[in-house]
Amino acid sequence: MWLLLTLSLSACGLNAQTFPTRIVSVPTVPTNTLAPVLTMTPRFTATPIPTSTLIPTNTLPPTATPFIPTETATPTPEPTRAVRGTVNNRSASVRLRAGPGTEYETLRTVPSGALLIIIGISSDLAWYNVVLEDGTEGWMLGELVTVPERTAVPIFATAELTARAATPRAAINLPTRAPTIPARANTFTDILAYCDLSQFRSEANKVFRPNQNLSIYWTWFARTAEQIQDHLDAATYEVQLERKDGDLWQLVRKLDDYDNYRTALTRAPNGRPEVRWFVPIGTLEVGEYRVSYRLTWSRRIEDGDKSFGPGGDEEINTGTCVFRVR
């Protein structure tokens, strides 16, 4: 403060004595030096927990990629061509036997020149298994048969020959529905259910006595036993006996129990498997009678020549037979 006053007085006087300027050094205020930044030392360094080392699993062998082959169409085998032959014994007819040897029964004699279908030959190459044109099967001595293509004929082993020859020609087993009566041929007192059809005229217009026991019969045959079985499984017979009363036919009896009177399978005269029904009707009073016959099938079947049933060549089979008792 005194310094300032002195300076002020000196400046106001005109003749004031000049004094040298005194420079007062003002002490420099030291600059605050920032304290060094402390580096924080971590209290502890976290030790990483070691990662568990996985135990290697068993490496499965590589799975084979499945190869799906492209379907190759299987070629349809060509049907076996029938081997044909002829009877060549010009001096006489040839015996058709039930088996490959002279010890087997003679089924019939066949004239020279007759055509044959050869279905096999015995293992000793001595006998042919043949089928005649009417379907009859049997055996013929090989030296009496001419076969242009002998090498194409299958050879039957001995065991197969024995089995084939042991099968009776008059009784062939069916897999189901055993017959209830033995096989037999028709007699005079058996009335054919459809005798009025033109091809059975010899059986039509029969006349019987009141004391005769009568039966109504019908048949079915085919080329194979399997076709017979198909028929039995699918067929329904509607057969009834009627008696004439004035201008009308009156029902006497329905033959609904026909299946109880089926015979064993036999060979028909043409050599094919055949089955018959003989349904007894007993004695009848004097009068004129008619059998009404109707056959249908639940499905289509074959007999080797035609088809029957729904969509077949013949869907319904019908017939009648008129006869008299007096």
Image (cartoon, grey):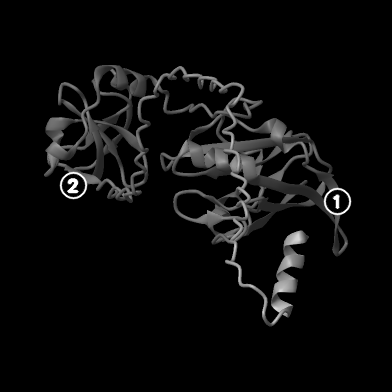
Q: Position of residue 296 (x, y in %)?
A: 67, 53
Q: Position of residue 267 (x, y in %)?
A: 46, 35
Identify which residue is drawn at 68% across, 32% down: 261
Q: Which of 301 and 67 lies nearest the eye of the viewer?
A: 67
Quadrant the N terminus occupies = bottom right
Q: Which of 80 and 13 lies nearest the eye of the viewer?
A: 13
- Camera sees residue 89: no
Q: Which of 19 and 44 lies nearest the eye of the viewer?
A: 19
Q: Where, by quadrant of the figure, is residue 211 drawn?
A: top right
Residue 268 placement, left or right of 253: left
Q: Amino acid at mark 1?
A: Leu
Provide the residue designation for mark 2. 113
Q: Residues within 10 Å of mark 2 (few under 14, many from 20)?
A: some
Q: Which mark is residue 23?
A: none
Identify which residue is drawn at 73% across, 66% down: 6
Residue 211 placement, left or right of 97: right
Provide the residue designation for mark 1. 251
Query: SS class of the residue under badge 2?
Result: loop
Query: SS class of the residue under badge 1?
Result: strand
